[in-house]
Image (cartoon, rainbow, N blue to C red):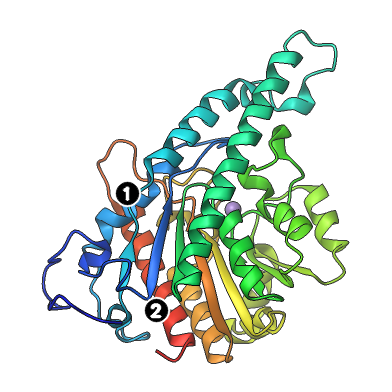
């Protein structure tokens, strides 16, 4: 919490740190961990450039926040964007492309002559995904061991698996509040073990310390995903966009709806936000945009109510942010930097800071 460099929170960004803040990762209470990973993107690409876009746009965010106060006083610093992870991602993407082109491994018959090559490619992508997960888990654990809070920025939604594993180990029973247009509960999507579309299947199957998964904003999903979450015996709750809108249109208040959403969460909460859970006007270049979604204000009220309920936010990630490939607009990064600042601000507030 030491603040070694004097700075004016109302002034222009005085440092090239995230939000223009002068803190080193050692000084900061919140460490932003960038993960430029997008190995198995099925539609639009560009989320590996998300961390750089968020960092650039963050310098324009005003630091004093009406709701969360002065998050910057606790210190926020971003680690360097890891070039080795970007290298693994590029390598995995090149391996994955022909598999995705073929419609996934399941779409190719066992006796198809392409099968041997495609299987080897899938194995290579899976190995790189496991390496990335290991790296993220180790980096997260390193920060948590130093008493820091970790805010991971992707990358696609495969990025935070290791962070969730490391955080859940220290906070057994924690719940995940998952904002997304998608359930991400697919079983090895296209054959890839560590696909962005499978992250919460992997989390729920392989991280027993995660007590609950509560999904909100869901509006694009497969029948098998719905069957899977219905079979979870209450360990997973999904709030589908269609139901949220119906309840709102029939006169229920957003506050009342959020009370039921938050009621499923245990005391300790990890936030996993896919930017596509928001209205795509707020994230036009994300990989798999879907009409509908939460407004910025609805998301904000969600965060506010989580903290007002007395729950503690123990970690967070923000994924699937992709900048305009033409470079003409910085809108995606701008919104994401503000979403991240709110998430961090509410995390700090939940700790009584
Ligand atoms: Mn997602």
Residue drawn at the location 26% of the way across and 40% of the way down: 327
Farthest residue in the top direction? 113
Question: Does the beta carbon of the residue at mark 2 sit less than 8 Å from ligand 1?
Answer: no
Packing grade of label 1 (10 A; few <14, some 14-19, many >=20) is: some
Along the viewing direction, whichever of 131 and 241 lies nearer the viewer: 131
Q: In the rendered image, which quarter is residue 117 located in?
A: top right
The image shows residue 203 at horizontal and vertical percentages of 70, 57
Measure the alpha-carbon separation of dots 2 and 1.
21 Å
Above or below, comparing residue 103 to residue 307 in the picture: above
Q: In the rendered image, which quarter is residue 46 located in?
A: top left
**Disc 1: which residue:** 52
The image shows residue 324 at horizontal and vertical percentages of 34, 42
Residue drawn at the location 19% of the way across and 59% of the way down: 16
Helix, strand or loop at mark 1: helix
Q: Is residue 341 left or right of residue 118?
A: left
The image shows residue 191 at horizontal and vertical percentages of 73, 33
The image shows residue 278 at horizontal and vertical percentages of 50, 61
> In which quadrant of the rendered image does the C terminus lie?
bottom left
Task: Identify the disc placed on residue 345.
Answer: 2
Packing grade of label 2 (10 A; few <14, some 14-19, many >=20) is: many
Helix, strand or loop at mark 2: helix
The answer, for residue 80, to whether it is visible in the render is yes
Question: Does the beta carbon of the residue at mark 1 sit less than 8 Å from ligand 1?
Answer: no
Task: Identify the disc placed on residue 90.
Answer: none
């Amino acid at each position: 919490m030491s603040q070694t460099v004097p700075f004016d929170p109302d002034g222009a960004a005085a440092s090239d740190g995230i939000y223009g803040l002068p803190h080193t990762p050692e000084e900061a209470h919140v460490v932003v961990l960038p993960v430029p990973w997008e190995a198995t993107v099925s539609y639009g690409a560009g989320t590996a450039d998300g961390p750089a876009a968020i960092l650039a746009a963050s310098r324009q965010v005003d630091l004093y926040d009406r709701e969360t106060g002065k998050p910057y006083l606790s210190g926020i610093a971003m680690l360097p964007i890891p070039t080795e992870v970007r290298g693994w991602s590029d390598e995995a993407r090149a391996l994955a492309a022909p598999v995705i082109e073929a419609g996934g491994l399941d779409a190719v018959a066992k006796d198809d002559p392409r099968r041997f090559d495609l299987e080897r490619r899938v194995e290579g992508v899976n190995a790189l995904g496991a390496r990335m997960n290991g790296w993220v888990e180790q980096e997260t654990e390193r920060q948590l061991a130093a008493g820091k809070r970790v805010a991971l920025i992707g990358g696609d939604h495969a990025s935070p698996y290791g962070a969730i594993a490391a955080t859940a180990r220290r906070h057994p029973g924690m719940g995940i509040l998952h904002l997304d247009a998608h359930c991400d509960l697919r079983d090895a999507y296209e054959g890839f073990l560590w696909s962005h579309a499978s992250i919460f299947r992997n989390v729920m199957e392989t991280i027993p310390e995660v007590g609950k998964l509560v999904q909100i904003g869901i509006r694009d999903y497969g029948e098998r995903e719905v069957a899977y979450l219905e079979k979870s015996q209450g360990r997973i709750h999904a709030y589908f966009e269609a139901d949220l809108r119906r309840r709102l249109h029939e006169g229920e208040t957003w506050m009342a709806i959020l009370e039921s959403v938050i009621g499923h969460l245990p005391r300790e909460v990890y936030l996993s936000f896919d930017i596509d859970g928001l209205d795509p006007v707020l994230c036009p270049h994300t990989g798999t945009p879907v009409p509908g979604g939460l407004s910025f204000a609805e998301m904000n009220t969600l965060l506010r109510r989580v903290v007002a309920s007395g729950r503690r936010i123990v970690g967070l990630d923000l994924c699937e942010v992709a900048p305009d490939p033409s470079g003409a607009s910085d809108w995606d990064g701008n919104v994401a930097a503000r979403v991240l600042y709110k998430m961090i601000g509410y995390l700090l507030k939940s700790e009584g800071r």
